[in-house]
Amino acid sequence: AAPPEPDEEHEGGEGEANGQTVGDSRSAGTVEDAYTFVLSNFIEMNKLWVRIQHIPGERSNKEARKRRERERNELRLLVGTNLVRLSQLEGVTPEVYGTVILPRILDQIAACRDPLAQAYLMDCIIQVFPDNFHIRTLDTFLAVCPKLREKVNIRTIVQSMMERLANYYADA
């Protein structure tokens, strides 16, 4: 379906979301609304990303397998983009990150049980969130490592985090 045509009332970049005008101060969402939405989107996209690899199909059909791998790769990028969006939300404090956002992300990573997804998402967390968030939540981040699948290279994850923090302190 084609996107709805903007009417005169909504010109100038403002759109609608659930019947409410985005940018209208009477219906403006909160930071909590934003991170709750992006977290939910992340969780559902991650579930789909993991599930798509198990879609039954002909093993001998190379074209179908290539298409599924291409679709899975596109979903992987979208899943990572959700984490980027979370890291860019204005108004997310280290406290909110440590008590709400990171625990929900880590719960999803541990629950997905897919080694490729687990390794990729742990690396995404390291890369996209600010250093000061990592410093305050290092214990929470490291606590999920024993819950990851055996095939996930924990050493690489920990080494990447330590290099990130070492660079932060070296620049400080």
Image: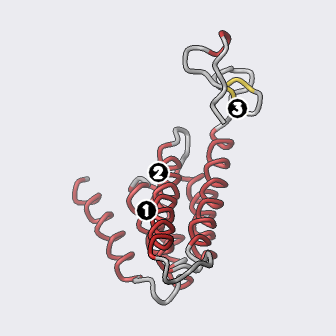
The disc at residue 17 is 3
Q: Nearer the viewer, residue 45 or 145?
A: 45
Please name the amino acid that badge 3 sits on: Ala
As drawn, the residue found furthest toward the left would be 170
Separation of marks 1 and 3 at Cα, in angstroms: 28 Å
Q: Which residue appears farthest toward the top when viewing the image?
A: 8
Residue 152, horizontal then vertical, whole percent: 44, 83
Judged from the image, the secondary structure of the residue bearing numbered disc 3 is: strand
Indicate which disc, 1 or 3, sits on the residue closer to the N terminus: 3
Q: Report the amino acid beneath label 2.
A: Val
Which numbered disc covers residue 124?
Answer: 1
Where is the N terminus found, in terms of image quarters? Answer: top right
Mark 2–mark 1 distance (CA, rounded to whole Å): 8 Å
Query: Which residue sits at x=41%, y=55%?
Result: 128
Residue at point 74%, 26% (across, down): 20
Q: CA distance from mark 2 to mark 3?
A: 21 Å
Q: Nearer the viewer, residue 7 or 66?
A: 66
- Residue 146 picture location, percent across and down: 53, 85
